[in-house]
Image: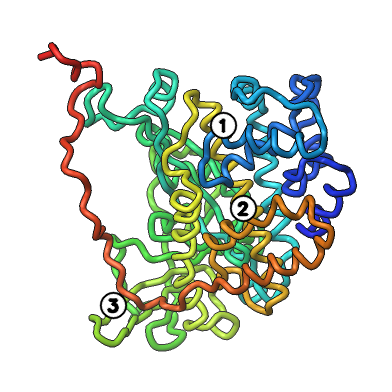
Amino acid sequence: MLDSFRSRIAAARKSNELFFAALIPVERIVSIFGKASAILDSASVYTTAVTTWTLLSQVLSEDHSCVNAVAKLIAFRASKNQRIPSSETGAYCIARDKLDEQSMHQLMCQTGESIEDSAPDTWRWLGHRVIAGDGTTVTMPDTPENQKEYPQLSAQKPGCGLPLMRMIVLFAISTGVVIQMTMGQYKGKKTAEVSLFRMIDDVVQETDVFLADRAYSSWFDIARLSRRGAHIVTRKHQMRSSDFRTGKRLGKDDHIETWPKPKRPDWMSKEDYEIYPDSIQVREVRVRIETPGFRTKEIFVVTDLLEATAYSKDDLAALYRRRWEAELNLRSLKTEMQMEHLRCKKPHRVRNEIRAHMIAYNLIRQLMCEAAKTGGVEPWQISFKNTMQTLNEMFPILSVIDDYESFYDTLLTCCLNHVVGNRPDRYEPRVVKRRPKSHKLMTKPRHDYKPGKS
C-alpha cells in the first residue's frame, strides 16, 4: 500500500533524502527493482532510486528537459552540502538508459492499484470498481531505432514522418489513476485497439465493470469478461440492429435479448472457441439525450448487468456518460503533461518515458484524492492541470520549510479551490481557433532541402 503524500513527505524529511523521495519511497523502488537495480546502485550519484526520482521530476516539470532535471538535483544536493554532480546530462541519460523496463511497468501498476484501493467506497459505482479503457497514439523522435520498432505511417515518405506508437490505457473511474496499459505499433497484426486490450484485460477482475466505447462491444469481449465474473457497459456496435419488441421487456426502451455465438474468427484457435457458450444474454437500453437547443440524440447501451432493480436504466445512462472521463484523462497525460510527442531516441527509453509520465500522473491523482477527501468532494471535480501546477510550485518548499504540516494543508486547500467547470452539455466541436503558420508541409527528407539540391 502506498502511504499518503503527507506521511511520505515526513519520512523523506527525516531521512534527509532527495525531496523527490516523497513521490516514491526508496524502499518501494528497491523492492520492485530487486536484482535489476544492481547495475545502478553502485553509482556514486545516480542510483536506481535517484535516477527514478529525477526522471519523475523531469516529466512533472513544465520544461521537460534533462538539463532542468539535473539542475533540480544539483540544487537539492548543494542545499544539503552533498557532492555536486556535473551539470552535464550524460551521466543522467546513461543511468536512465539502464532502468529496467519490467520494473518500471510494475511500479506504474502498483502505484495506481495502491491509490485506487485506498479510495472510499462512496466513490464506487453501486459498489463496483469501474475501469474505463481507451486507445491513443504518441509520436517520438525520428531515429532509425524508433522507426524500426514503431514505423511511421506508410502514406508518408521516408524522412517526412515520425515514428508512431499506439497504446491502450485503463483508468479507474473513481480516482482517475492508470492501473494498466500496453504499447504496440500503430499498424500491423494484433496492433488494433481491441487486440492490445485483450493482452491486458485480465486486470478487469470479478465484480469489476469495464466501461468503453463500441469498439469493445464484440460478442467475444462481452463473453470473456462475463465468464470471469466481470461486467461490461459499452455502446452497441453500429452494425447491430435494435428492436425493443423482442426479448424480455424490462421497461420502456429496456430489454434483455439473446445473442448466439458467431462464427470463429481467424485470430481465435478452435480450442479457445469451444470454451465460449453457445449464446449470451445481453441487456440493451436506449438513452435519449435531450439538451435544449440541440437535436435529440439516441445512444444504445449494452451490458451484462441484467437486474433492472439493482441497475436501473438511469444508472446505466449516467455511468456511460462518465466514459468521457477516459478521454479527459488521456488529454491530461498528452496535453497537460506533454506526452503527445516524446523525447527519447531509443524505443526502450521511449517506453520508460511513457511509464514515468503515468507514474507521475498517478501521484498527482493521489494528491487530488487527498484533497477531495478533506473537501468532501470527488477527485474528478478537481482540476488536474491546476493541481499539477500547484504541486510543482509548492513541492520543493515542503522539504525545507519548518511548519510543513500547515503548508501541506495550504497545498490541499489550493488544489480544492481549482474546480473543473460543470458543463457536460457544452458543445465543443473538434476545431481550433488559432490559425497555424503558413509553412509548407515537409514532403522530402530534411537533407534534400539544402541549397543546391533539386
The residues bearing labels 1 and 2 have C-alpha atoms spaced at a distance of 17 Å
Label 3 sits on what residue type? Lys
Q: In which quadrant of the rendered image does the C terminus lie?
A: top left
Which amino acid is tagged 1? Val
Residue 441 vertical placement versus 249 (above, below): above
Using the image, determine if residue 444 lies above or below residue 374: above
Q: Residues within 10 Å of mark 1 (few under 14, many from 20)?
A: some
Tell which of 79 and 424 is nearer to you: 79
Which secondary structure, mark 1? helix
The residue where tag 1 is placed is 67
Q: Position of residue 419 (x, y in %)?
A: 54, 73
Q: Which residue is mark 3?
A: 297
Kindly state the secondary structure of the residue where label 2 is placed: helix
Sequence-first tag of 1 and 3 = 1
Image location (x, y in percent) of residue 302: 44, 69
Q: Earlier in the sequence, mark 2 or mark 3?
A: 3
| Depth check, front residue: 263 or 355 | 355
User: How far apart are the two marked residues, 2 and 3, measured between alpha carbons?
Assistant: 42 Å
Q: Residue at x 58, y 46 (%)?
A: 60
Labels in figure, total: 3
154 left or right of 262 in image? left
Q: Is residue 20 above or below residue 378?
A: above
Mark 1 in CB contact with mark 2 (< 8 angstroms): no
- The residue at which mark 2 appears reads as 392
Res. 1 visible in picture: no
